[in-house]
Image (cartoon, grey):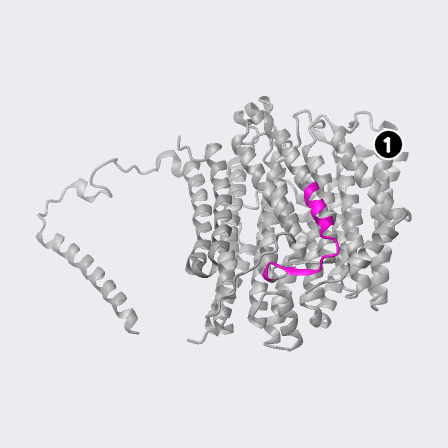
């Protein structure tokens, strides 16, 4: 029997290794460093490793190689998405590390194991303990996200999916205030997430049964040579698609999104909303553009339908919301539809448009949720829309920044959202799906209405007597918001350098 | 098929021994009936109609069970490695040491944070 | 024995699991149904490995088992924490976030 010893290209998976190694280091810090010092250690390790990993990604620039025996593909889209994820994670970690906003010290419960409202919880709160386990959890999730768009076979994709999901389930349950709501969010996210990943796994099994391999390039060859039973293949593709569409919260697999976005601690929501979507769309792009491109006549109508339903229902539901976090959640569902419009184009323009949209959407989302953490009353964050009326009187700067993010969501020119929407709609039009473009533009118009309604509320309504206060953002939140706002503006005003970068990167290796 | 005959033989021997022991005890033992004989346990704590604590199992059992599941299942990766250890050589050993070290980090966390303390 | 029969069992297990998730109300039972679905996928992987004549499917089953174990631990932690705050594991009681 000839035996092939596997070869691992450590240099090419270095960004993932750095982040996961730092997560393991973070667990050791939790175990051996005294409680008072942990926070400093964790913040330094998290931010340091993310920056280091970003440097590693930049140094890999131009690589196009299938590494680790076909499990990890390091190519343009992988590196672009990994870079984007790492920058977004910097914003996310800054928000998670913020200690100056909540009077209790941080947005996370001091001791997740204590019962809400119990004596033990009060003792834990009074002792001033700051939760620091959330940092290694964030890094584990980030490691999974970095691997997700790079996965070269379905099993690596499944493992990456779980590595990114499991820490997020826990992190959604860690809120310091409204803990029952937060635990509930964690339960819903977990049950539905586990359900969808079971679909993904069974779909992978069926595709393996068809192709005899789980590697995307092998599946591609099997499809082009028409190797097996088409029914098994199509069922497998449908099930795998369910698992992936759940992660990007496309209708009809979106039910968890508003509840989890509302219940989770807002910094976690920011991280999750931005990064999960980027990573999961990266995986979708690779699966459909590489593995299943020979099958496009079968999956394109399906994904186009999902895109249309997602856009339309996302904006209609968002219209009816009265809670800021829920509204942003439904708007994120609608954006998943817009990005799918780029995905179903199945050409280079579609890939480029989707990549640009992901970057633009991610930074805007980090910024928007960062602003939500600033508007507070005595019970914590004031997320009801009516509480935001007249916010511009209290803090013109915060209100204007939030207005910028909303305009970017709405796709108004001179913001990143406009360039992004234009890119995906142009790609969809060039591939002949004009119906999709028409629905997309109409949904954007409806979406613009409710975004601008919030802006009008902030700038032209009378502030409430007992309304919330706008906290002056402490240094870390300021840094995150500045990062998000400047990227949103730069991508809107002079997107050409990033578009050129994407143009040279947008080529899958297999 | 011959390979499986010893397994079947062991099964038959085990089954036969169990039947033999029960029958032998029933036939040869003295027969004195009293109330204690009909209890679930002949000695030790008297069974009560309701379990202690209303039938709830203390959380510490649950924690131990969860730790067991995780550390138990991780071992699964050692089997294929052990089978092909000769071929993988130093590379395989190195990778496996990293894997086990990572599992030990989790163990260190559990130990330091009191997850292994029973009381 | 015809390996396709194993596939039918696996499909049956998967369907039972999926139906269980959709119809049961106790979060522990829902969770057990999810595990059933994962194991159905495992059975399918191993059967397909036999049909296809390569070992990939069997190795994948290992990965699935480990991932499922991690999922069990995370899931039970969440379910136990919510059970302790509410004295109930029913998903119908988890309704603060409905609007």
Q: How many other residues sit within 10 Å of disc 1, few (<14), some (14-19) or many (≥20)?
A: few
| Residue C95 in view | no
Image coordinates for residue A507, horizontal then vertical, percent: 76, 62
Q: Quadrant of residue A429?
A: bottom right
Q: Chain of mark 1?
A: A
Q: Quadrant of residue A208?
A: bottom right
Residue picked out by circle 1: A397
Q: Quadrant of the C terminus of chain A?
A: bottom right
Q: Nearer the viewer, residue A343 or A38?
A: A38
Image coordinates for residue A87, horizontal then vertical, percent: 74, 44
Image height of A339 relative to A461, above or below: below
Taking the spot 74% from the left edge, 51% from the top edge, the residue there is: A333
Image coordinates for residue A179, horizontal then vertical, percent: 61, 34
Relative horizontal placement of residue B54, taking residue A469 as reference (left or right): left
Taking the spot 88% from the left edge, 52% from the top edge, the residue there is: A496
Q: Nearer the viewer, residue C84 or B94?
A: B94
Relative horizontal placement of residue A176, taking residue A393 as reference (left or right): left
Image height of A28 relative to A328, above or below: above
Image height of A231 relative to A111, above or below: below
Q: Residue furthest top?
A: A126
Q: Residue furthest front?
A: B90
Q: Nearer the viewer, residue C25 or C41?
A: C41
Taking the spot 53% from the left edge, 55% from the top edge, the residue there is: C34
Q: Nearer the viewer, residue A478 or B107?
A: B107
Relative horizontal placement of residue B100, taking residue C97 as reference (left or right): left
Q: Where are the magenta residues, as a range?
A: A51-69
């Amino acid at each position: 029997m000839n035996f092939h010893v596997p070869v691992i290209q450590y240099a090419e998976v270095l960004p993932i290794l750095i982040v996961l190694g730092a997560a393991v280091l973070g667990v050791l810090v939790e175990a051996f460093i005294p409680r008072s010092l942990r926070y400093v250690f964790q913040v330094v390790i998290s931010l340091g490793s993310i920056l280091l990993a970003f440097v590693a990604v930049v140094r890999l620039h131009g690589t196009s190689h299938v590494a680790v025996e076909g499990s990890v593909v390091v190519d343009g889209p992988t590196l672009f998405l990994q870079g984007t994820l790492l920058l977004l994670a910097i914003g996310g970690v800054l928000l998670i590390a913020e200690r100056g906003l909540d009077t209790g010290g941080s947005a996370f419960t001091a001791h997740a194991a204590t019962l809400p409202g119990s004596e033990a919880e009060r003792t834990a709160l009074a002792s001033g303990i700051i939760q620091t386990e959330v940092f290694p959890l964030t890094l584990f999730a980030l490691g999974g996200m970095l691997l997700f768009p790079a996965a070269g076979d379905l099993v690596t994709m499944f493992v990456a999916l779980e590595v990114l999901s499991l820490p997020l389930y826990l992190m959604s349950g860690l809120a310091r205030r409204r803990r029952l709501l937060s635990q509930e969010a964690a339960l819903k996210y977990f049950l539905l997430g586990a359900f969808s990943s079971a679909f993904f796994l069974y779909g992978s099994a069926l595709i393996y049964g068809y192709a005899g391999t789980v590697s995307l390039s092998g599946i591609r060859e099997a499809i082009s040579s028409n190797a097996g039973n088409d029914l098994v293949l199509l069922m497998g593709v449908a099930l795998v698609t369910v698992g992936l569409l759940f992660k990007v919260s496309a209708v009809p697999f979106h039910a968890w999104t508003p509840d989890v976005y509302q219940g989770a601690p807002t910094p976690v929501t920011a991280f999750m909303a931005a990064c999960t979507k980027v990573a999961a769309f990266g995986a979708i792009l690779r699966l459909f553009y590489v593995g299943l491109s020979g099958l496009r006549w079968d999956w394109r109508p399906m994904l186009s339908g999902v895109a249309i339903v997602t856009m339309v229902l996302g904006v209609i539901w968002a219209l009816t919301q009265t809670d800021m976090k829920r509204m942003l959640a439904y708007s994120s569902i609608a954006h998943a539809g817009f990005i799918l419009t780029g995905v179903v184009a199945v050409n280079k323009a579609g890939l480029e448009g989707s990549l640009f949209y992901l970057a633009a959407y991610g930074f805007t989302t980090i910024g928007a949720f960062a602003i939500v953490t600033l508007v507070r009353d005595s019970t914590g964050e004031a997320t009801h829309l009516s509480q935001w009326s007249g916010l511009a009187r209290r803090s013109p700067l915060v209100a204007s920044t939030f207005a910028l993010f909303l305009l970017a969501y709405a796709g108004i020119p001179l913001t990143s959202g406009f360039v992004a929407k234009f890119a995906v709609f142009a790609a969809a039009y060039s591939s002949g799906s004009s119906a999709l473009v028409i629905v997309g533009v109409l949904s954007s118009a409806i979406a613009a209405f409710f975004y601008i309604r919030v802006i009008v509320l902030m700038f032209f309504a009378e502030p409430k007597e007992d309304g919330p206060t706008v906290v002056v953002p402490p240094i870390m939140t300021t840094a995150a918001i500045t990062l998000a706002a400047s990227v949103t503006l730069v991508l809107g005003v002079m997107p050409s350098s990033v578009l050129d970068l994407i143009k040279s990167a947008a080529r899958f290796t297999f | 098929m011959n390979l499986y005959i010893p397994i079947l033989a062991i099964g038959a021997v085990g089954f036969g021994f169990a039947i033999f022991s029960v029958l032998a005890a029933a036939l040869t033992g003295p027969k004195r009936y009293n109330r204690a004989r009909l209890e679930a346990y002949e000695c030790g704590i008297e069974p009560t109609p309701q379990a202690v604590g209303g039938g709830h199992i203390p959380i510490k059992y649950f924690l131990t069970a969860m730790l067991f599941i995780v550390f138990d299942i991780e071992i699964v990766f050692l089997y294929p490695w052990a089978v092909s250890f000769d071929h993988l050589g130093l590379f395989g050993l190195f990778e496996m040491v990293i894997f086990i070290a990572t599992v030990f980090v989790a163990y260190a966390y559990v130990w330091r944070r009191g997850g292994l303390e029973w009381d | 024995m015809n390996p396709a029969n194993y596939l039918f069992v696996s499909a049956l297990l998967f369907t039972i699991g999926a139906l269980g998730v959709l119809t049961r109300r106790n979060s522990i039972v829902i969770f057990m149904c999810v595990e059933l679905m994962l194991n159905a996928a495992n059975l399918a992987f191993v059967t397909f490995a036999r049909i296809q004549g390569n070992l990939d499917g069997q190795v994948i089953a290992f990965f699935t088992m480990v991932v499922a174990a991690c999922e069990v631990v995370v899931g039970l932690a969440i379910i136990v924490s919510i059970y302790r705050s509410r004295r109930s594991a029913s998903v119908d009681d988890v309704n603060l976030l409905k609007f």
